[in-house]
Image (cartoon, rainbow, N blue to C red):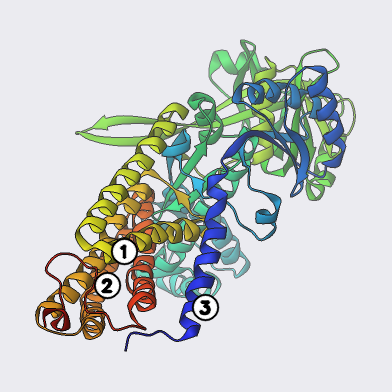
Amino acid sequence: MNRYPLWRYILLAVLIIISLIYALPNLYGEDPAIQISAKNSAPIEAVEEKIKSTLNAQHISYLSVRPVDNTVLVRFPSTEDQLKAQDVIQAVVGTDYSVALNLAPRTPRWLQAIGAKPMRLGLDLRGGIHFLLDVDVGAMVKAQETGDLHTMSTALREARIRYTEMSSDQNGVMIHFRDQAARDQARTLLEKQFPDYRFEATASSLRGTISITALHQIQQNAVDQITTILRNRVNELGVAEPVIQQQGESQISVDLPGIQDTARAKDIIGKVATIRLQLVDVEHDAETASSTGTVPFGSKLYTFEKQPVLLKQQVVLKGTSIINASSVIGEDGRPAVRVRVSGSDVPSFNRITGENVGKPLAVVYVETQTTRHLVDGKVVTQHRQIERIINIATIQTALGNDFQITNLSTMDYAKNLALLLRSGAYPVPVDFVQERVVGPSLGQENIHMGVLSTEIGALLVIVFMAFYYRLFGVIADIALALNIVFIVAVLSILGATLTLPGIAGIVLTVGMAVDANVLINERIREELRNGMSTQASIKAGYDRAFATIVDANVTTLIVMIILFALGSGPVQGFAVTTTIGLLSSMVTAIFFTRAVVNLVYGRRRASRLSIGINAKSAEAKK
C-alpha cells in the first residue's frame, strides 16, 4: 500500500545529489579580483607576466594571476590590495585593455568544470548604482520621417510628379499638389515604395503617417541600438558584471555593481555627444559676420578661444565613421585623442582633406542636453543641442584612416572624449528618470539581515514541526532544508540574480513549504481518529491532501506569473524565487516526505504513528 518502486527512489536520489552539487559553490565565497580584457585585437597573453612582475615590484599582495575565458583574472587577499592594484595595472597594460574591479568566486575547478557557479548578487546586496533611462522614441520617429521626406521628394521628382510643398509635423508628413490628379498619382507611387506609411487624401494634399507596426519596430530598434551603445560605455567604465535590460516599451534599466562614483557613471552613460569635422570658411570674414549678424549662406558662426569663427556647414567626417579612439599625449606635450576611421569612409575623407591642404579644419563637439521645466503643474522635458569647437588645426597633408585631435584642455577630458567616440553616439536623447546608489556596507548588511531572517524563520518552523508532529515533523524539516537547497541550486543553474526581494521570496517559501506537510499530517491524524489503520491513514492523508495542496499552489503561481509579467526588476525577483520555491516545495513536501515515510512505515505493521498527540490508530485502541 505504502511502497514506492525503486526507480522513484533512484530519481529522488539523483535529483538531491545534483542539487547539492550545484548549490555547493555558494558556500565558498568570493575573492576581490581585477579582470583585464582586450578592447580590440590586443593579445591578452602578453600582459600576464607584466602584471605579475609589476605587482611584485610594487609589493602588492595577490593570490593568483591566470587567464580565464579570454581575460586575465587577478585575485587579491583583500579589497585594499585590489584598489591599490587597479591604477598600477591600468598603467601597465595601457588603453588597449579594460581593467574592471570584480569579485571572483572561490569555486573549485572540478565544480567549474561541470558549470557549477554561485548565484549572482543583485545591486541591493552587492552595492553599486542603478539607473533607469527613458529613450526619446519621438525623436527617432521624427528623424525617420525627415529622412523619408527627402526620399519621397526624390521619388516624386524621378516619377515627374509635381508637388507644391512638402513638410513634416507631429502628425506625420504632408505633401501638397496642384491638383487631385497629381495627388492620386503620388499616392499610388508612395504607397508602393513606402509600405510603412498610411496615406490619406485631403483635397489636393496627402497626409502620410507611420503605421502602428512600423512605429513599434522603430521604437524597438532605438532601444536595441541604445542598449548596445550602453554596453560599450559600461565596459569602458570597468564594470565586470553589469545588468542592462529593457524595461517596458521605451525604458532601459542599468545596474552597475561595485561602482560608487555616481557623477562619472552618469556623465559617461547619459551623455548624448559626438563630433563632426568641418572646414573653416576662410573666404568670408568672421568678425564682420559676428558684428553685423549676417552669416554667409552655407556657413555657421561659432566661437573658439573667445574669437568668432565661420565654419562651412558641409561635414567632412561624422562621429559615426569613427571605429576606435584613444587618449594620448600629442607631439606638443598636451592631451590629444588618436582617432581611427572606418575603411568605407576613408576614400571620401582622404579626397576632401587632400583638396584642402593648407586650410584649417575644425573639430566640433556636439552634445544634446536635457532640461526639465514645470509647465501648468506638469514636468516638460526639453532637449537642446550644444555645439562648440574644441580644436582647429591646419591640414598638412591628405588624411587617411588615422589622425589626432590635439590641443585638448586636460587628460581627463581627452579620456572621456575618446571613450564616447569609441562607444558611439546615441541616435536619440536619453533621460534619467531614476537613480539609486547602494553602498557596499549597506549591501553586506542586507545580506546579513536577509540570511538571518531566513535562518530565524526556518529555525522556528523546524522547532514547531518537530515538537508538534514528532517523527513526521522531523521528516518535514528535512524536506524544508532540501527545499532551500533546491531553490539555491536552480537559481545557480539558471544564472539568476538574487536580490533582497528574492530573499523575501525564499523566506515566504519556507513558510508555505511547510503548509503542505501540515495539511498532510493533519489529514493523517484525522483518519487515525476516525479509526483507520496506520497504513490506510498514511495513504488517505497523502492522497486526499494532494488536490488541496495543488489547488493552493496553482492559485499562488498564477499571481506570481502576473507579478513577473507586469512588475519591474525587484518584483520580478520576488516572483521568480517564490515560483521556484513553490515548485520545489511540491517535490519535497509531497514526494520526498512520502518516500521517507514509506521507508519507515511501509514495510511493517505499526500500531502507532509518531505524528503527535492523540494520533492512535484503531489497532492501537484495541
Between the C-alphas of marks 1 and 2, the distance is 21 Å
Residue most extreme to the bottom: 1
In the displayed image of the protein, which residue is found farthest to the right?
A: 397
Quadrant placement of the N terminus? bottom left
What residue type is disc 2 on? Val
Secondary structure of residue under mark 2:
helix
Furthest residue in direction front, as rendered: 622
Q: Residue at x 47, y 29 (%)?
A: 440
Q: Is residue 213 above or below residue 400?
A: below
Q: Which residue is mark 1?
A: 476
| Image location (x, y in percent) of residue 365 | 62, 28
Task: State the quadrant of the C terminus.
Answer: bottom left
Evaluate whether residue 565 shows in this view. Answer: yes
> Which residue appears at 60% of the width and 18% of the height?
289
Q: Which residue is mark 2?
A: 554
The x, y position of residue 22, in whole percent, is 56, 58
Mark positioned earlier in the residue sequence (3 or 1): 3
Image quadrant in which you'd find residue 215: bottom left
The residue labelled by disc 3 is 10
